[in-house]
Amino acid sequence: MGRLSRRAFAVAALATLSGFGTAGDAAASPGRARKAEAGQLRGMWLATVSHRDWPSSPKLTADQQRAELLDHLDTAVRLRLNTVILQVRPTADALWPSPYEPWSQWLTGVQGKDPGWDPLGTAVTEAHARGLALHAWFNPYRIANHTDRTKLVATHPARRHPDWVVPYGGKLYYNPGLPQVRAFVQDAMLDAVRMYEIDAVHWDDYFYPYPVAGQEFDDDATYAAHGAGFPDKAAWRRHNIDCLVQEMAARIKEIRPTARFGISPFGVWRNAATDPRGSATTAHTQTYDDLHADTRQWVRQGWIDYICPQLYWNIGFAAADYAQLLPWWARVAEGTGVRLYVGEALYKAGDPAQPTAWQDPAELSRHLTFARDHPQVGGHVFFSATEVAVDRIGALAQVVADHYQQSAKPPR
């Protein structure tokens, strides 16, 4: 899925810091627990790209796909989660009958083939029947995880408008600098907002693509045509993404005023060495500079309803310490009215390729204990549904025992 690239950012970690709350701390403070449970978002991502979480195979029948989906929803309820973030537009395609883009290949193995049912419509109905919120997760600009346009269905917009497409890093992307592209991707996503009573529109960390060593995202001609008045290409690119965010926010509210708009970016806006307003990190990637996504401004200006930074590092990790980043994001969100949720790396727990801290089942529980001292934090989201169900070393079970003793309704 799109988020698999995050694993590239995992490097050697420091030992788990001492001095933070242990697994029993939550139970020892029932008053704080009740406060945390009120209006608290408890979510999981459910990824569809490359069969990351669901459906498990393109060979399933419609009934089998539906049964798998419902099983994921039931798992969320069993673990006292209250929100499912379902990826419904993973690669410029759709998990609903869209007039703009083809049926997703991840459903049947064939792009454009009708799966025989409506996955998004079913997900919304069945999630709500279980008391779950359903956030529809869209990827605005990614077209394909390859560079061969002929593999796309003949009617795909990327084939009808080849001038919209930029190959980069072994993938195909829509060019964010083209106004017509920005309008089209909004129209394609907003079709789902019109059709279904989704609780939120959700984007992850893909704006301009993550840098690939030795390659350049070829938008020179677009910059020459549309970049007048900007000091450099980077500023123009950030403007393009800012416009996408602002325009989408306004259009969502026009179409479905009850739906929220949230974004889950890479967890580091800028390092303090780059910008004194940045975090005490030394991360290789910075969203402002590398993805041209000014995530801090989106929050400070109140353009979005919630931010869910992917804080996929352990407490004490040298380059990007969870215990440094969470307070930084809390300060960014403070006083803005934008809710802060925290993306948690459940997928790392018990993975033998990960640092020592992630072999401790209590690491994630310590994250939630630490977050309790920051009232701006309104909940946590776990990546992702496969790990939620399997729970390799019981890390999520520890979270549930320590922090989710009672069910909680989704925040409104």
Image (spheres, rainbow, N blue to C red):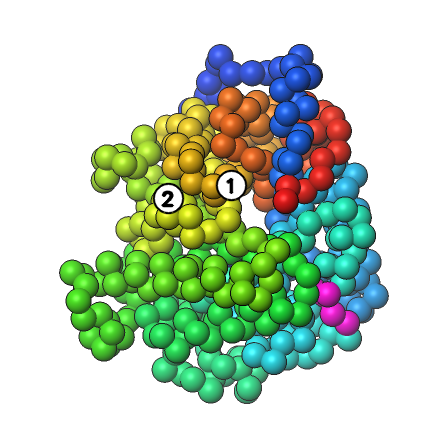
User: Which residue is rendered at x = 17% and y = 67% of the image?
Assistant: 229
Cα separation between marks 1 and 2 = 11 Å
What span is colored magenta in the figure? 117-121
Residue located 54% across and 73% down the image: 188
The quarter holding residue 141 reads: bottom left
Alpha-carbon neighbours of circle 1 within 10 Å: few (<14), some, or many (≥20)?
many
Q: Is residue 77 left or right of residue 193?
A: right
Instruction: For residue 137, say whether it is visible.
Output: no
| Amino acid, disc 1 | Arg
Q: What percent of the width, then of the height, locates residue 333? A: 43, 38
Give the residue type that dot 2 points to.
Arg
Q: Quadrant of the N terminus?
A: bottom right
Q: Which residue is mark 1?
A: 339
Tag 1's secondary structure?
strand
Looking at the rendered structure, the secondary structure element under dot 2 is helix
Seen in the picture, residue 342 relative to 359 is either above or below; the reply is: below
Tell whether 348 sits left or right of 128: left
Residue 318 visible here: yes
Residue 44: image quadrant is top right
Residue 384 placed where, x, y %? 62, 46
Position of the C terminus by quadrant: top right
Residue drawn where x is 49% and y is 32% of the image: 376
Q: Is residue 354 above or below residue 85?
A: above
Q: Whole-percent x and y of residue 102?
A: 60, 78
Q: Is residue 262 magenta?
A: no
Residue drawn at (46%, 75%) of the image:
184
State yes or no: residue 120 in magenta.
Answer: yes
Give the mark nearer the N terminus: 1 vs 2.
2
Q: Which residue is mark 2?
A: 300
How crowded pointer 2 is (Cα within 10 Å; few <14, some 14-19, many 20+) is rated as: some
Look at the picture and state if 359 lies above or below 189.
Answer: above
Residue 176: x and y in percent read: 37, 68
